[in-house]
Structures are given as structure tokens and as C-alpha cells.
Image (cartoon, grey):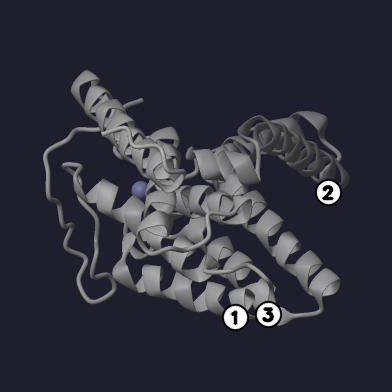
Amino acid sequence: MVEVFMRGKTHCAAGILAGIQLSIIFSMPVSIINIIASAAFSILPDLDKSNSIISGFIFRKKTSEHIYKLLIYTLNAAIFFMLIKMNADFLVSGIISFFIIIIVEKKVSHYHVRKYLVSFSLLLIALLLIIITNNIFFMFPFVVFAVFPWLKHRNFSHSIIMIFLVYIMMKPIEMISSLDKISVISAFSYGFHILCDMFTRQGVALFYPFSSKKISLGYIKVGGKFSNIIEKILVLLLFIWTFISVAEILGIHII
Ligand SMILES: [Zn+2]
């Protein structure tokens, strides 16, 4: 399958490096938590795509496939036994349930069930956080992202409004915890993902919901050999830049 967008791994690597770079430029703390936030928020926009890295991280695809199969089998068996109870004729019940099963399998797809499972997992985390922290601010990001699997890909998730929303959601968490500058880092990493996607041919609906027009700054077709090389070169350049910056801070002059 040809991926339409930059791959999750590239997003994650670029997000972490850009996060570190931002911290260095603006003299912000480079903590482990901030790096984790950078990594997470740089792949979170693609949560509206059920085969993305972040979606697989929240709920394993293999597990959701097993649950889906179990659900379908249980549903089919239930339909069959219900029909047998209603209609004593085994043959008639068998034929009717055969057709109902075909309809059920057509209507209930794995991706549909998967969306519920991803959303449900995030809501469960939100609930646990409320119980553990006794503070509603920790749950907001999880509740907002629980909606993501149901959104149209690349619209709301890849908009400027969402970057602000990430900042607004993370600010109270920063204030009530000791997580210094996590709101800026999170919003920046989220925005950096969108910026990277803007260089793909597909573009992003940056001004959603005011405009659904896809804005693109480049012609990179993701998934192709050329774009894979470009992605690697960009990450490498960013890595070298970050490496030099860190070395400068430590007093080692490379150039
Ligand atoms: Zn994306």
C-alpha cells in the first residue's frame, strides 16, 4: 500500500530533533519528559489514520484483528441460535442466518471495530488519570484524541486550530506539574508534523474548519524511493545540526 503521508518513523525522528533544536535556540530545558512529549506529539496528528504508528501504539493491530474475529464469530453464532429458537426448521434458519452473516460481515469491518477500540483505550486512560491525579486537566488531551479515529484524515487533525488546542490543553498540565515548557514543546512538535506534511503533494487542510482546501508546498510523493531518500537526508541534516548545537553547548567547537 502506498502511504500518502510522511512515515511515522520519520515524523518521530524529525519531531524529536526539532524539539531539541527549539529547546536549544530558546534556552528551554531538554528533559527526558520533553523529548517523550516531542516524540508523541510529532506522531499524534496521524491518529486519524488507523494504520499509523501512533494508532498501533495505542492499540495493537493484531489484537484488534483477533477481537474483531471473535466479535464476528460470536455475533454469527448468536444470530444462528436466535433463528433456531424462533424457527424450529434447521434448514430455513441456516439459510437465513447465512444471508444475515454476509450482511453483518459487510457492514462491520475490522477498521470500524478498531476505531472503537482505539477511542475506548484513550477514554480509559483519561478515566484512570482522573482517578489517579484527581485533576480533570490531565484527561483533556486523551478525551480530545479519543475523537481522532473518527475524523476525516488530514483535516481537523492537521489544522492550525489543533496546534493551538494542543498548547491550551498542555498549559494547565505544565502549570500544575513540574513539567517545564511542555506546552510549547508539544504544540511545536505537533505543528512540525503538519509542516512536514505540507511538503507532500497531498497537502493539509491547514485552515480547517474555515476552509477544507489542502495546502501543499511541495511535490513529494510519499512512499516512493525518491521521497524516502529525501526524508532520510532531511532527518540526517537535522541530526547533524542538533549534534553540532549540543556540542557547542558542551563547549566543543566542531565548526
Ligand atoms: Zn500527518
Label 1, on which residue? 172
- Disc 2 Cβ-to-ligand 1 distance below 8 Å: no
Task: Specify the quadrant of the image occupied by residue 84.
Answer: top right
Task: Specify the quadrant of the image occupied by residue 235.
Answer: top left
The alpha-carbon separation of the residues under discs 2 and 3 comes to 59 Å
The alpha-carbon separation of the residues under discs 1 and 3 comes to 6 Å
Circle 3: element type: helix
Q: Residue at x 37, y 49 (%)?
A: 18
From the viewer's side, name the closer residue of 223 and 243: 243
Taking 229 as reference, is 74 above or below it? below
Q: Residue at x 54, y 77 (%)?
A: 171
Count of numbered labels shown in the rendering: 3
**Residue 90 in sight in this render:** yes
Q: Quadrant of the C terminus?
A: top left
What amino acid is labelled 3 in the image?
Answer: Ile
Q: Residue at x 77, y 68 (%)?
A: 129
- Residue 176's label in the rendered image is 3
The crowding category of the residue bearing disc 3, from other C-alpha atoms within 10 Å (few below 14, some 14 to 19, many at least 20), is few
Q: Going by the image, does 252 lie left or right of 141?
A: left
Label 2, on which residue? 86
Give how far across and how far down residue 219 sits, in percent. 11, 39
Give how far across and how far down residue 128 sits, in percent. 80, 65
The reply to whether discs 1 and 3 touch (Cβ–Cβ < 8 Å) is yes
What amino acid is labelled 2 in the image?
Answer: Met
From the viewer's side, name the closer residue of 181 and 55: 181
Circle 1: element type: helix
Q: Residue at x 63, y 75 (%)?
A: 173
From the viewer's side, name the closer residue of 191 and 34: 34
Choose the circle earlier in sequence order: 2 or 3: 2
Task: Specify the quadrant of the image occupied by residue 100.
Answer: top right
